Amino acid sequence: MFKKIILTLFSGLILTEVTMAQTKYGVGSYNTEEVAAEMEYIEKHIRPLNPKPAKRIFITGSSAGIGELTAKMLLAKGYEVVAHARDAKRAADVKRDLPEIKHVVIGDLAKPDEVDKIAAQVNALGRFDVIIHNAGVYRGENIFQINLLAPYVLTAKITQPQTLIYVSSNMHNGGELRLDAFNAGNVGYSDSKLQLLTLAKSLAVRWSKVRVNAMHPGWVGTKMSGGSAPDPLRQAYETLVWLAEGTDPAAQTSGGYFFNKQPDSHYRRDSEDSAQQAALLQALEKITGVKLPE
């Protein structure tokens, strides 16, 4: 009987330790083991810059995956970062994972009225130096809204920063702009990422005083990929940090498309066509009722 009690207690202790290991940084819920390992890497190896950097950075979709890793590394370096979460529960997760963070903006990008509220919350915190439009979904009925309409509206409504960064995908090469049937029912993931890249390219021309770039993270081991992917996760979030810091001459350009801290020439050249860009902006203005500032 005594042995049985000891074994039960011992088993319970092991189970508790395993559960804690699995749930740290949301493993098994909103993050993968690979993401958790990178979070721990940042904790151990990244130290504050001296002097303390002054940039203020806002990141959409920063409650998990690449967005959360980018926020963690920037915070570890001493930057002021404002995160974004879909709801109060996910905001609590972010605050637990990133104890240094002061503000988490809350709003569901799938709901247009909440996108407006996100913009208002960000503007209430003052002007930001860098805004990273990272949030995105791979499947489901909200691809068009989350991957394209939301970043467009936020770009239009949030006070212009010095630097804008958009997370596209190399899968944009298989997409179409679909301006003849511009609605949620006709836009897939690859389409949305081509549209987003075209938006970024058009803004780089339209707003000469803002540094605007796009990047693609590759196929990396976040929950979106299913947790198993061949490309280096560390390179993905470090590229976003690299673009946000903008200290490397290669990151000081505008209108670029990057992969692993390098310009990537494998992108659709029609994203740079001025007529296509104008048509996309016109379609976005019509469907959202929101006009970009000049």
Image (spheres, rainbow, N blue to C red):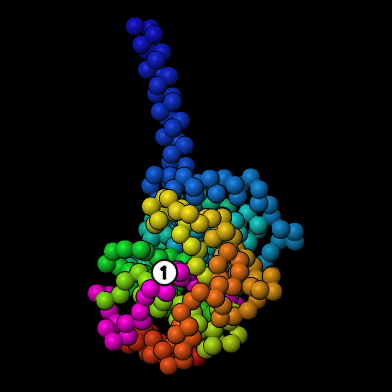
Numbered label tally? 1
In magenta stretch: residue 169: yes
On-image quarter of the N terminus? top left
**Residue 211 picture quarter:** bottom right
Which residue in the rendered view is the most extreme toward the left? 185
Q: Which residues are magenta?
A: 161-185
Q: Nearer the viewer, residue 87 or 265?
A: 265
Instruction: Please name the residue shown 44% across and 48% down the image.
Output: 32
Element on which disc 1 rests: helix
Q: Nearer the viewer, residue 229 or 54?
A: 229
Q: Is residue 41 above or below residue 186?
A: above
**Horizontally, is 22 left or right of 126 in the view?**
left
**Residue 115 picture quarter:** bottom left
In magenta stretch: residue 292: no
Asked if residue 190 shows in the view, the reply is yes
Which residue in the rendered view is the most extreme toward the top? 1
* Residue 72, x across and y down, in percent: 56, 55
* Residue 149, x across and y down, in percent: 37, 76
Instruction: Please name the residue shown 43% across and 41% down the image.
Output: 23
Q: Is residue 290 above or below residue 175?
A: below
* Residue 171, x across and y down, in percent: 41, 69
* Residue 157, x across and y down, in percent: 45, 79
How busy is the neighbourhood of tag 1: few (under 14 within 10 Å), some, or many (20 plus)? some
Instruction: Please name the residue shown 45% across and 69% down the image.
Output: 170
Where is mark 1, residue-wise? 171
**Horizontally, is 57 left or right of 149 in the view?**
right
Asked if residue 125 shows in the view, the reply is no
Q: Nearer the viewer, residue 87 or 256?
A: 256
Instruction: Please name the residue shown 61% across and 66% down the image.
Output: 261
Report the amino acid beneath label 1: Met
Q: Is residue 136 above or below residue 201?
A: above
